[in-house]
């Protein structure tokens, strides 16, 4: 990593419940959390935003949210994000064969029309030279209302921020799953 985390005891007391919850959930404190926490107020804001996207009443189902986060992570070459988000996607009921097919989703029969519309949009928003076409938006509107489209766009933007942060700082995977190509 390009920046090393501080010892847990060096972080403000009010961040420790976040770390405790991560340890309970993942078996370890997540390396990116320790890096974000070097700026405690920013970390708190990022954690709250993540929580908003992961709420139970989201208009986007949990598996679809995880599918988006894995694809963004792959595009941005974030090994940590691919690791943790692939494991999350599998826990949300998506089998490993489909997860392994994600990098070549256009050639795969594993994805339905709704997922294909979301994946195309995710690529268009993530690639800096990508453009969202009217056809792409019409395909999405067959499956989502404006509130869901707004949240989908926010989720893609959030995962871009997160995966670019982790990739730039060279955060390694933490061993949540076998990464594609391993």
Image (cartoon, rainbow, N blue to C red):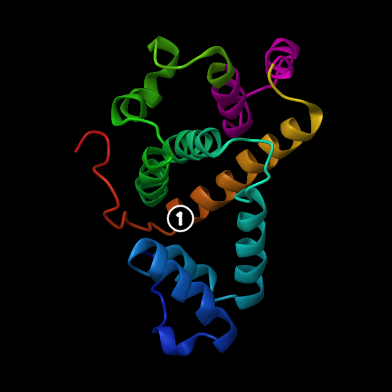
Nearest the camera: 55 or 73? 55
| Residue 150: quadrant of the picture | top right
Residue 30 seen from this side: no
| Residue 171: quadrant of the picture | bottom left
> Is 113 rendered above or below residue 173?
above
Residue 160, image x, y percentages:
57, 44
Residue 38, image x, y percentages:
53, 76
Q: Residue at x 71, y 10 (%)?
A: 135
Residue 6 seen from this side: yes
| Residue 43: quadrant of the picture | bottom right
> Is 45 rendered above or below residue 38?
above
Nearest the camera: 125 or 85? 85
Task: Locate the N terminus and report the quarter of the image it occupies.
Answer: bottom left
Lateral position of residue 99 relative to residue 178, left or right: right
Lateral position of residue 14 relative to residue 93, left or right: right
Q: Does 54 lie within the magenta span?
A: no
Q: Secondary structure at mark 1?
A: helix
Q: How many marks?
A: 1
Residue of label 1: 166
Residue 141, image x, y percentages:
74, 18
Lateral position of residue 91 relative to residue 11, left or right: left
> Is 47 rendered above or below residue 69?
below
Q: Residue at x 68, y 19 (%)?
A: 143
Nearest the camera: 65 or 30? 65
Q: Residue at x 56, y 12 (%)?
A: 113
- Residue that sits furthest to the left in the current view: 182
The 10 Å Cα crowd at callout 1, few under 14, some 14 to 19, many 20 or more, is many
Task: Locate the C terminus and report the quarter of the image it occupies.
Answer: top left
Residue 91, image x, y percentages:
38, 43
Lateral position of residue 142 relative to residue 23, left or right: right
Overall secondary structure of the magenta section:
helix
Q: State the extent of the magenta-drawn residues as a range.
A: 117-142
């Amino acid at each position: 990593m390009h920046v090393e985390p501080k010892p847990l005891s060096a972080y403000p007391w009010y961040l420790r419940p976040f770390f405790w919850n991560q340890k309970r959930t993942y078996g370890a404190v997540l390396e990116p959390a320790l890096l974000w926490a070097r700026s405690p107020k920013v970390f708190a804001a990022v954690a709250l935003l993540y929580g908003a996207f992961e709420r139970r009443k989201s208009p986007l189902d949990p598996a679809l949210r995880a599918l988006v986060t894995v694809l963004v992570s792959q595009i941005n070459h974030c090994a940590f994000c691919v690791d943790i988000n692939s494991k999350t996607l599998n826990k949300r009921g998506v089998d490993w064969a489909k997860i392994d097919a994600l990098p070549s989703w256009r050639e795969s029969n594993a994805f339905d029309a709704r997922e294909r519309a979301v994946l195309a949009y995710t690529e268009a928003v993530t690639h800096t030279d990508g453009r969202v076409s009217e056809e792409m938006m019409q395909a999405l509107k067959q499956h989502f209302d404006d509130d869901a489209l707004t949240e989908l766009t926010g989720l893609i933007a959030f995962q871009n921020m997160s995966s670019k942060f982790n990739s730039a700082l060279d955060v390694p995977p933490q061993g949540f799953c076998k990464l594609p190509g391993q």
